[in-house]
Image: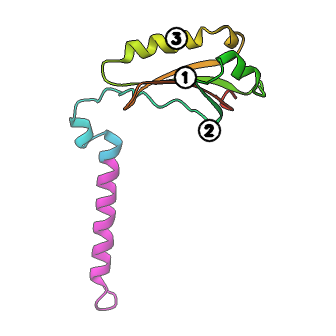
């Protein structure tokens, strides 16, 4: 091998790089490696939070609050709006809040409207109704 003095290390490094590349590529093509030795993982399905847009209006039952029907009749309703009934519950109170929220969703004022019930853990029990542009 004749060449300029001091360049033989560059050729040797290039040869080693090619060998490393080919070895890695062939191992990946065969499926060798740690991921092949590990047992296959089951797909985990996680409950993603529902896509809820910012509310345009909010209603909560309580002293001095209008009925749900009166409140809805006072709102400008667009066909792209959805009525979201949000139920927040403390530990051990899920069923009670679900029953309360189901009563709200059964209100005749909601008939014919797109309604979604959302239950989630919270620091206090609550049921509220929101109008938002998340109906597509």
Q: Position of residue 102 (x, y in %)?
A: 52, 11
Quarter of the image where one finds residue 13 = bottom left
Q: Position of residue 99 (x, y in %)?
A: 46, 10
Residue closest to the eye, 81 or 60: 60
Sequence-wise, which precedes: disc 3 or disc 1?
Answer: 1
1 left or right, relative to 115 = left
The residue shown at (74%, 27%) is 80
100 left or right, relative to 18 = right
Q: Quadrant of the C terminus?
A: top right
The residue shown at (71%, 18%) is 70
* Label 1 Cα neighbours within 10 Å, binned few <14 / some 14-19 / many ≥20: few
Q: Secondary structure at mark 1?
A: loop
Q: Position of residue 62 (x, y in %)?
A: 55, 22
Residue carrying label 2 = 54
Residue closest to the eye, 45 or 64: 64
What label sits on residue 102 in the rendered view?
3
43 left or right, relative to 105 = left
Sequence-wise, which precedes: disc 2 or disc 3?
Answer: 2
| Residue bounds of the magenta highlight | 1-26
Q: Nearer the viewer, mark 3 or mark 1?
A: 1
Q: Mark 1 and mark 3 in contact (Cβ < 8 Å)?
A: no
């Amino acid at each position: 091998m004749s060449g300029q003095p001091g360049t033989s290390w560059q050729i040797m490094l290039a040869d080693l790089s090619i060998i490393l590349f080919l070895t890695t590529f062939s191992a990946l093509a065969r499926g060798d490696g740690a991921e092949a030795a590990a047992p296959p993982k089951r797909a985990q399905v996680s409950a993603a939070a529902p896509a809820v847009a910012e509310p345009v209006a909010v209603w909560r039952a309580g002293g001095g609050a209008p009925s749900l029907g009166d409140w809805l009749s006072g709102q400008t309703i667009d066909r792209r709006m959805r009525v979201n009934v949000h139920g927040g519950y403390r530990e051990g109170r899920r069923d009670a809040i679900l029953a309360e929220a189901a009563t709200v969703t059964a209100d005749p004022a909601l008939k014919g409207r797109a309604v979604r019930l959302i239950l989630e853990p919270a620091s206090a029990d609550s049921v509220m109704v929101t109008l938002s542009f998340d109906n597509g």
